[in-house]
């Protein structure tokens, strides 16, 4: 006999942990199945910091979702007493006609978000460690900052099992990869692992870079390998404190975007910077997990030109995966072929900040079959055929 639940969640990374929590909180009996350990470093949700921002240059459609995420992150901090979010301000830099600048302005204006447009001189005056080109400008907003991804995943997992939930709650199984799932004759979902068989009325699949093997859906996804690196600023770390140094995203060339953070809590971690553009195509199975000299050289080239005060000793580096869609927008929707299944994947290197609202949306889809949040632009069906 299969163990039965209301909902099964496959994958307990950024999105799956949030879905398990929101389902449990709403009284559902949830089973979460995860290939690795809690808040592990082999997927896409590790590396001590993730940017969160509001003037979303990728598409104004994300703004209502990110504003809801801020509320949910703050609520999660209150419920767990964990520090998950630090507000430090955000700078989106490039030439005036660049996607990063124009897209940020568009979202800020459409959604009435407080922001300023800074020219090169003003950027230098406020943030002296940055070396913009004469033609650079920046959109600045005060409400951007960074999240702590491992702590955030752990917070969702902890609350899902402890349950603010009165009747519901989640059983979470780690190191138990799902090998297959199917729909039974009775219309339930049956999920199989090496350790057992489980059934539920609904299945949520949040597979990260393993999407292809789990979705039973042909989607044009590809996985990219990205390296995060932590540097020791030669003149000291004080200039990079979140009190005076923001998160930034910088379009420096037609094919180059780099980004970074202020110094985070941990004193010996240094200051993180990384490339958002590029990244070798790989799979979750074949990725080269060790960083290479050329990975660091690529980041250093940007630092030497734009933030020389950060171009010091390398303290640490780690690889991570982006799961890309062709338009770089997420896939969050009902499975086109199975009404009992919802999917969340293809986060294209910018999903983490949305994890709690995606969790809420996935709970809505599983429980009610629809959501009030505007996710039509994220439908799996846009790639059908
Ligand atoms: C270097 C880097 C920098 C980033 N920077 C930012 C940023 O600044 N801001 C931002 O918002 N986003 C950022 N992102 C993107 C963001 O981190 C991801 O979009 C998000 O973490 C994806 O979450 P996920 O749940 O889809 O994937 P994951 O967290 O990887 O979770 C998927 C889970 O599914 C599990 N799984 C897979 N197959 C199975 C199976 N068969 N059975 C059971 N479990 C399975 C995996 O083990 C994994 O735990 C960045 C990503 C990277 C890599």
Image (cartoon, rainbow, N blue to C red):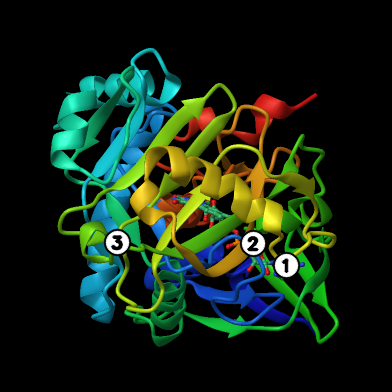
Q: Nearer the viewer, mark 3 or mark 2?
A: 2
Q: Which mark is residue 319?
A: 2
Q: Nearer the viewer, mark 1 or mark 2?
A: 1
**Could you tell me which residue is drawn at 32 percent across and 36 percent down?**
131
Q: Is residue 229 above or below residue 225?
A: below
Q: Which mark is residue 73?
A: 3
**Could you tell me which residue is drawn at 42 percent across and 57 percent down?**
50
119 with respect to 341 (left or right): left
Residue 289 spot, x, y in % from top left? 73, 66
> Judging from the image, what secondary structure is the residue with disc 2 in?
strand
Q: Is residue 27 above or below residue 322?
A: below
Where, quadrant-wise, is the C terminus in this rendering? top right
**Do the residues under discs 1 and 2 have CB atoms within 8 angstroms?**
yes
Whichever of callouts 1 and 2 sits on the residue coming sooner in the sequence is 1
Residue 347 spot, x, y in % from top left? 57, 45
Q: Which mark is residue 290?
A: 1
């Amino acid at each position: 006999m299969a163990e039965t639940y209301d909902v099964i969640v496959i994958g307990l990374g950024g999105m799956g942990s949030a879905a398990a929590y929101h389902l449990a909180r709403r009284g559902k009996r949830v089973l979460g199945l995860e290939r690795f350990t809690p808040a592990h470093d082999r997927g896409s949700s590790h590396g001590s910091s993730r940017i969160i921002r509001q003037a979303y240059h990728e598409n104004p459609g994300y703004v209502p979702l990110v504003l809801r995420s801020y509320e949910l992150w703050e609520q999660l901090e209150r419920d767990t007493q964990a520090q998950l979010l630090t507000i430090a301000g955000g700078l989106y830099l490039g030439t005036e006609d660049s996607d990063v600048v124009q897209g940020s302005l568009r979202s800020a204006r459409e959604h009435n978000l407080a922001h300023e447009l800074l020219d090169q001189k003003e950027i230098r005056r406020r943030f002296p460690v940055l070396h913009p080109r004469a033609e650079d400008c920046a959109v600045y907003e005060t409400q951007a900052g960074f999240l702590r991804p491992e702590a955030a995943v752990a917070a969702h997992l902890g609350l899902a099992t402890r349950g603010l939930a009165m009747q519901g709650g989640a059983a979470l199984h780690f190191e138990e990869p799902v090998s297959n799932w199917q729909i039974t004759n009775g219309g339930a979902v049956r999920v199989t692992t090496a350790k057992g068989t489980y059934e539920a009325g609904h299945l949520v699949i949040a597979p990260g870079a393993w999407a292809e093997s789990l979705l039973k859906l042909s989607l044009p996804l590809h996985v990219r390998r990205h390296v995060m690196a932590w540097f020791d600023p030669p003149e000291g770390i004080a200039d990079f404190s979140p009190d005076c140094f923001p998160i930034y995203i910088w379009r420096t060339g037609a094919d180059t975007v780099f980004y970074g953070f202020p110094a985070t809590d941990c004193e010996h971690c240094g200051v993180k910077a990384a490339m958002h553009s590029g990244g070798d195509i790989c799979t979750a199975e074949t990725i080269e997990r060790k960083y290479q000299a050329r990975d660091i050289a690529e980041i250093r080239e940007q630092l030497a030109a734009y933030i020389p005060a950060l171009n010091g000793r390398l303290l640490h580096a780690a690889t991570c995966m982006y799961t890309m869609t062709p338009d770089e927008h997420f896939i969050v929707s009902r499975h086109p072929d199975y009404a009992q299944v919802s999917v969340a994947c293809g986060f294209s290197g910018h999903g983490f900040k949305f994890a709690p609202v995606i969790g809420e949306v996935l709970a809505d889809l599983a429980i009610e079959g629809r959501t009030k949040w505007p996710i039509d632009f994220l439908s799996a069906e846009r790639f059908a055929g």
